[in-house]
Image: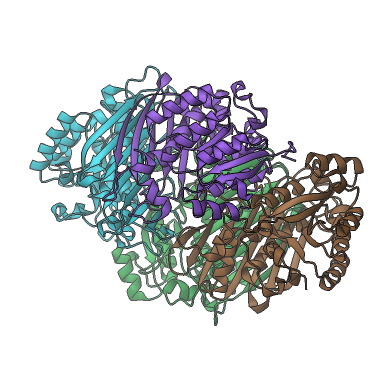
Chain colours: A purple, B brown, C green, D cyan
């Protein structure tokens, strides 16, 4: 009975037309709990494709838009206009629609990274701060139940004082020059922004490191590299961190490490214990209280607590994937902070609240 | 764009009210691709609970029924009546509603096991054979992409002649006398039928063994046991098989093996190679051509073929769970045999077709 | 300082000449702690090979024998004659030398299985019972520290009443007709005895099941098969057990399961907890107290006790292999029972004492 | 028949008396193949302990020495004097005995690290260059068969041009202030030298990185930390490398990461493939040719070649540990380069030849 609200949230989408990857994933996630209804879309920058994509999704003809500006104007004028918009475009197209929908008072669910440059990010922060609408950034991996469990255990002091935060996100799909839609925009600095692997996947590892540890970074040393000849953005990065309070850590992201599909991994150690987790086997969290045997904590199994079960739908032992944005959409989720409780109907989205932009 | 049909299938549900487990899982699965719309329900045998459960799910008041007989009669009389019904009750309540809805020409999606005794199973087979409606049994694990991959590899001869099929489904949640709704009916022969662990989980291991190997059993030797004092059904079973054609195998199911959550595992060996798979890590299939190194085949990764990708929604490396009944509901799925192509709108359900009942 | 005895035990060997496998492994094991000195041998049934093998090992010319009868006679007559003999021949050549050396008062370390038929086994038991010399059977896997740990935990009641003992020993090297020395005698009933896989490897799984659980078998149901055309002994066996006291279990051994090298695995469950162990990753033991997270107990790590550390030489984290017979030879080992304390110098051998033959 | 030389090498030992760790491991390794015989020792800096330790090991009374100077003088004067000496003292005591024995023409097998400061290392290099005796440094992990396999595969071009070398060696035993012999000298800069974790374990990870990749480091950025209050040496280090030819990599070593025993791990990636290996599961090497499924290569199994089998004693599937210095002592080993073939009897030691000091 996860859909405790009888009226689903009316959702629009920018991007996500035929051939897109992340837009479809957002749609899977939006349907799962029955809490959203996709009713409008500016699904492609090519009007014909926007139309055919909208029709394939069964949108009403008058709510299939040629561009996001049109959608923002018309939807905000309707009595039954969208409550929220999901922005699932390449990085360079996050800022403009996010700003516009916020200015129209429509909540924004934006795929990461925030924007493709720092200037836009700061400007967006200003806009979001002035708006009554929420701005939500989908760092989806924080929605894994075992990442919530880890964060809770750190907060409870079960690891003691945190000393080390080791993260990595390693892939291999860009080992060679690739010629497909996903590779193309991700390696084009005009569309991806200055970052290659660092923006596409490193951002997730960094986000998890801070989310779970509760720490902030004080200084970094980084070595970025483009291994594939002709590549204009980094396809590998090594970063060393010094966190506030004395903890240290590293982040390794790569898209050129053959044998790795989505090797997102987090290891965190304090003076009382350690935790290890790997995204490709996400239902397990390995916990070692110093001087005791390592324990395998499973989602909803013994040893896992409320922080994990709040984001979980099924019993232990049944592998539970995370839909790219499911933590955001799940109706079970409680707001991480009181500052979010402004738009009750949207409470369940808010994994990465605006307040984290500050 | 998985929802290529603009009009979702209208779905009713028998069972699955407040406190139920499998009904909610069916609802998750039905929503994921947007191919179904839950519009009616007889959600509990207690009328008040049936009503409050239906309201919580947002059903129209006139389509919340006190019992399944009422639902069958009234829905079959409506122009916009349900196309299909999901039966998610305890085992002893599969037969009666399944029979009734088939007789009303409404397709039936029934949770396993088929019925709680052999007599009912045979009777249901007769009913289903005479009906134009489909009868679908949700042996959901066959919907895992890597089980499809395995079945395809066996069919392709990549393992040679099959010699051994080793399966197990091992849990621990009934190690002690349990006092909760799920344990209660599963250990009560009046509701679960004669089988305990063998009907609840052994049936999945058996189904997978046959589904992947393509073999039929010729003879068995079984040793069933009730370890927990006072338990009236088996909580552990060891079975040895002789398959047609000379292959052999075993099945072990248990609900009293501490440390196992949902240890469903299949290993199959032929004279040219072997395959191993474990449900708790379902995105990997381990393949060894005899005399060569073992290979890790990943969902949608190199080495995986079309049989796997048809049932998969996301790229490799992003763990993809299987919703309890998702293979049945997925709009991507093709019919396993031509005999199913009678109700085109329902093609996508038919993992375990009526023909397998024969 | 493991060699606390300054005078090593004088060892002879029957079998183990050029091209042999297990004889060399016995020699590795005998050297490791410096507790044995190989001084005599009847290393092959071919005198020339016996001689060249003995020379290659640096034996004195007068202690290289043409046959075991000669060795028994002459060594028992020497003042500095061998204290013990290791019998490392094919199965059919265990009985005669074992009987002879026992009759000469020389301790016998015999590779498994005991003999190649039951009649010989009973006769050997009589001989061993009358002899002052020890008879030691090298069921070496009981020497793994984590198997000692497991046995101790069962004995301590940490698993409660044992309900299930699941064992398997699975290989693939005989998947096809093989033409080499090791395969040749193992598939020839004249040399291996009636058992194929069951005698070669099944015996280890069975031994471990009893060693760790402390249970005795009451009745069995077995299905043996020879899959490879023309093979005269079993290459696969499925066995179901009923143990005294009500526990049940299975044993699967196979030499035709592609992808398995030495898949010896033991899982044991009681009403309070469960244990799992795999020989190919022998330094870890997985323990689940019912209702708590699974723990990874490591050799010499936290959670492992004295029973394990007695048979271990190095700290945790450094993988420690078990030489085929090392538990028998290790000077650290204490006698499993007081009945063994008859030949103090040999105490350290006695993993599988004669008393278990009864 | 690994001992093809009838006369074992006569070995002396400096350090390794009662309570020592690494000395005993050297003794295990020296015995395994029967190629060495321990005949002399200066086993402790405390004469009484040196004597009782030597007696416990069964050394002749006149070859138990009070100090290494005495042993060098007297052994080099004997006709049956030691051929080689194993130096197994704390780091600060490597230089003086190594220098002295080399000057006496006795081969030196020295535990890592080379010396406790750079000045001594350079001086030792000069001495070794002028000596006819060999200087051998026991970076033992290079003796794992699968590390030889990896190195061969890199040399064969199976990974293409190497881009990334990621290594780590992570432990937890110094998470808190420890009070035992092993911890004591390792955290005392007077005895361990300037390095803590970096010299004790980081040196192994670095050695493996270069050994397998064949690359040399051009520049580094390192961040060392002492987390435990009062600790005078590093207990954690993060290092970024730029290798000659453009490859990059990192090394993480730590002794304060709870849950890690001896987490030595190497991952290496080129433009054609990747390799992954972990010391705690050393018999497996994971190889991914880009665009193909990952393969599990096992020691002596299909896919493993001669480079691995040369250093292996037993068939696949039987876990084979590496004794701390076994690669050095094994009689099977061939010299890595022609420059070593000066002292034929010692060829089999030379994993880390003097030439690598240059």
Asked whether, in this view, residue C261 is left or right of residue B233, the answer is: left
Q: At which x and y percent is residue D205?
A: 32, 40
- Marks counted in the figure total 0
> Is C231 located above or below residue C59 in the figure?
below
Q: In which quarter of the image is the C terminus of chain D?
A: top left
Asked whether, in this view, residue D178 is left or right of residue C205, the answer is: left
Along the line of sight, which residue is nearer the eye, D78 or C155?
C155
Asked whether, in this view, residue C352 is left or right of residue C178, the answer is: right
Q: At which x and y percent is residue B253?
A: 71, 56
> Is C56 located above or below residue B271 in the figure?
above
Q: Is residue A278 visible?
A: no
Along the line of sight, which residue is nearer the eye, C275 or C38?
C275
Q: At which x and y percent is residue D154?
A: 28, 55
Asked whether, in this view, residue B50 is left or right of residue D37, the answer is: right
Q: At which x and y percent is residue A206?
A: 44, 33
Which residue sits furthest bottom? C230
Q: Quadrant of the N terminus of chain D?
A: bottom left
Q: Residue at x 80, y 42 (%)?
A: B177
Which residue sits furthest top? D230
Along the line of sight, which residue is nearer the eye, B56 or C304?
B56
Q: Can residue B221 be seen in this view?
A: yes
The quadrant holding residue D261 is top left
């Amino acid at each position: 009975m996860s859909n405790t609200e009888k009226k689903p949230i009316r959702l629009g989408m920018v991007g996500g037309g035929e051939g897109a990857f992340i837009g479809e994933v957002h749609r899977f996630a939006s349907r799962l709990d029955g809490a959203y209804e996709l009713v409008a879309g500016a699904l492609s920058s090519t009007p014909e494709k926007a139309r055919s994509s909208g029709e394939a999704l069964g949108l009403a003809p008058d709510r299939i838009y040629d561009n996001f500006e049109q959608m923002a104007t018309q939807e905000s004028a309707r009595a039954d206009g969208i409550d929220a918009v999901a922005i699932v475009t390449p990085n360079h197209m996050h800022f403009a629609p996010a700003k516009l929908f916020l200015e129209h008072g429509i909540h924004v669910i934006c795929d990461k990274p925030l924007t493709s440059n720092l200037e836009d990010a700061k400007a967006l922060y200003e806009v979001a701060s002035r708006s009554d609408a929420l701005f939500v950034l989908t760092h989806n991996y924080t929605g894994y139940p075992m990442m919530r469990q880890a964060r809770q255990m750190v907060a409870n002091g079960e690891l003691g004082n945190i000393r080390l935060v080791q993260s990595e996100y390693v892939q291999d799909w860009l080992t060679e020059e690739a010629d497909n839609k996903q590779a193309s925009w991700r390696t084009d600095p005009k569309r991806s922004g200055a970052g290659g692997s660092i923006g596409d996947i490193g951002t997730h590892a960094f986000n998890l490191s801070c989310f779970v540890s509760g720490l902030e970074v004080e200084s970094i040393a980084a070595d970025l590299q483009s291994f594939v000849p002709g590549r204009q953005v980094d396809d590998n990065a090594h970063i060393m961190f010094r966190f506030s309070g004395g903890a240290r850590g590293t982040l390794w992201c790569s898209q050129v490490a053959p044998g790795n599909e989505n090797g997102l991994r987090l290891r965190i150690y304090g003076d009382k214990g350690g935790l290890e987790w790997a995204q490709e086997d996400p239902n397990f969290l390995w916990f070692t209280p110093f001087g005791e045997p390592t324990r395998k904590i499973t989602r909803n199994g013994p040893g896992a607590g409320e922080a994990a079960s709040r984001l979980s739908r099924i019993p232990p032992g049944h592998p539970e994937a995370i839909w790219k944005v499911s933590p955001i959409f799940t109706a079970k989720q409680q707001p991480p902070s009181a500052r979010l409780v402004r738009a009750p109907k949207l409470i369940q989205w808010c994994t990465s609240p605006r307040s984290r932009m500050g």
